């Protein structure tokens, strides 16, 4: 392999890492609020308290 092919591989690896980071940010943003609400709800139920709300705001998959 010459210098050009090594630099292309490095660029592709960097590009893939950037894609993974953006995907992680998207998932964290999309599901973060609803998962926090779900955690709060289950903690209240586990403590024997009546939850203030049963509404989970977010994607339908989390609400199910």
Image: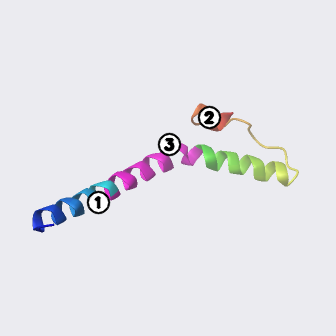
Q: Is residue 6 left or right of residue 32?
A: left
Q: Residue at x 66, y 35 (%)?
A: 63
Horizontal and vertical percent position of residue 7 = 16, 64
- For the record, the magenta segment spans 17-33
Disc 2 versus disc 1: distance between alpha carbons? Answer: 32 Å
* Disc number for residue 30: 3
Mark 3 touching mark 1, by CB under 8 A? no
What is the quadrant of the N terminus in the image?
bottom left
Taking the view exactly as shown, the residue that stands out farthest to the right is 48
Task: Give the colouring mode of the picture.
Answer: rainbow
In terms of depth relative to the viewer, which is nearer, 42 or 50? 42
Q: Residue at x 55, y 44 (%)?
A: 31
Quarter location, residue 47: bottom right
44 in relation to 7, above or below: above
**Mark nearer the viewer, 3 or 1:** 1
Quarter location, residue 3: bottom left
* Disc number for residue 33: none
Mark 3 touching mark 2, by CB under 8 A? no
Q: Is residue 7 left or right of residue 42?
A: left
**Mark nearer the viewer, 3 or 2:** 2
Overall secondary structure of the magenta section? helix
In terms of depth relative to the viewer, which is nearer, 45 or 52? 45
Residue 19 part of the magenta segment: yes
Residue bearing the label numbered 2: 61
Horizontal and vertical percent position of residue 17 = 34, 58
Residue bearing the label numbered 1: 13
Q: Residue at x 39, y 53 (%)?
A: 20
Quarter location, residue 21: bottom left
**Mark nearer the viewer, 2 or 1:** 1
What is the quadrant of the C terminus in the image?
top right
**Earlier sequence position, callout 3 versus callout 2:** 3
Q: Is residue 57 left or right of residue 8?
A: right
């Amino acid at each position: 392999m010459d210098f050009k092919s090594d630099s292309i591989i490095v660029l592709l690896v960097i590009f893939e890492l950037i894609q993974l980071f953006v995907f992680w940010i998207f998932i964290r943003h999309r599901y973060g609020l609803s998962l926090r609400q779900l955690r709060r709800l289950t903690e209240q139920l586990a403590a024997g308290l009546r939850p203030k709300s049963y509404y989970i705001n977010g994607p339908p998959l989390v609400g199910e």
